[in-house]
Amino acid sequence: MREEIWIDGFNLFYAWPETAPLLRASADIGATLAICLRRLARFLGNYRRRAIVFLDGGLTAGFDNIDGLSVRYAGSGGKADDLMRKHLGGDERRARRVTAVSNDRGLSGSLRMLGVEMMTAKDFLAIIAKKARRSQRAAADIRLSPSEIETWVEIFNAPAGAQTSEIRIASRRRKNHG
């Protein structure tokens, strides 16, 4: 995946088992979208790529930032597909830095011709979920040696305001006298 990820928001949210039921049952699309966008921001949290979500419609065209996730609204009657094309503006250099997520074949074809890497919502979700599982396993696999545990205990039991050098001195005294 490239350095920027552009996401057709509704394509992704209706393909994602975590958000699709919310959208289908919602009477308040604005509040539901906010929930979906926050979940996506959390899901992408450790991915370290700039992500922009493009959304159809909206009361007015504009942009927002939700939990670090850039959001672009197409405006009343507007389409996310058109907004993505406009955002790229035919810039082929930028296109080579973008991975776009959409299930729309027409959009995929036109962006791919400019050099954008395309991915379906399902494929994108599979990649991100795999990375999230790997990240969770890595966090669970952290093991500390007895000496590392001892060091952390000494640091957290140190008097308030103690400097690292004072902690080391106190640690040596305990080892020498203990």
Image (cartoon, rainbow, N blue to C red):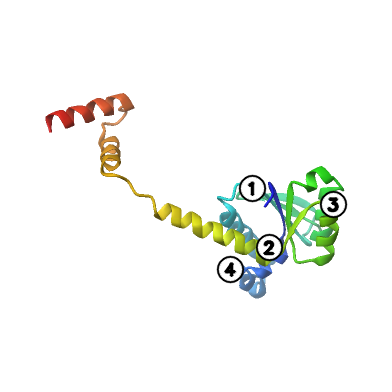
Q: Quadrant of residue 119?
A: bottom right
Classify residue 18 as left or right of residue 153: right
Mark 1 and mark 4: Cα distance apart in space: 21 Å
Q: Which mark is residue 2?
A: none
- Residue under pointer 3: 114
Classify residue 40 as left or right of residue 134: right
- Residue under pointer 2: 30
Q: Amino acid at mark 3?
A: Leu
Q: Quadrant of residue 157?
A: top left
Image vertical order of residue 165 relative to residue 43, above or below: above
Question: Which of labels 3 and 4 is toward the front?
Answer: 3
- Residue under pointer 1: 49
> How dense is the environment of label 3, judged by Cα within 10 Å: few (below 14), some, or many (20 and up)?
some
Question: Which of labels 2 and 3 is toward the front?
Answer: 3
- Residue under pointer 4: 18
The earlier-in-sequence mark between 3 and 4 is 4
Question: Which of labels 3 and 1 is toward the front?
Answer: 3
Give residue 68's position: percent from left, percent from top: 62, 48
Name the residue located 65 percent from the left edge and 72 percent from the top edge: 26
> How dense is the environment of label 2, judged by Cα within 10 Å: few (below 14), some, or many (20 and up)?
few
Classify residue 105 as left or right of residue 11: right
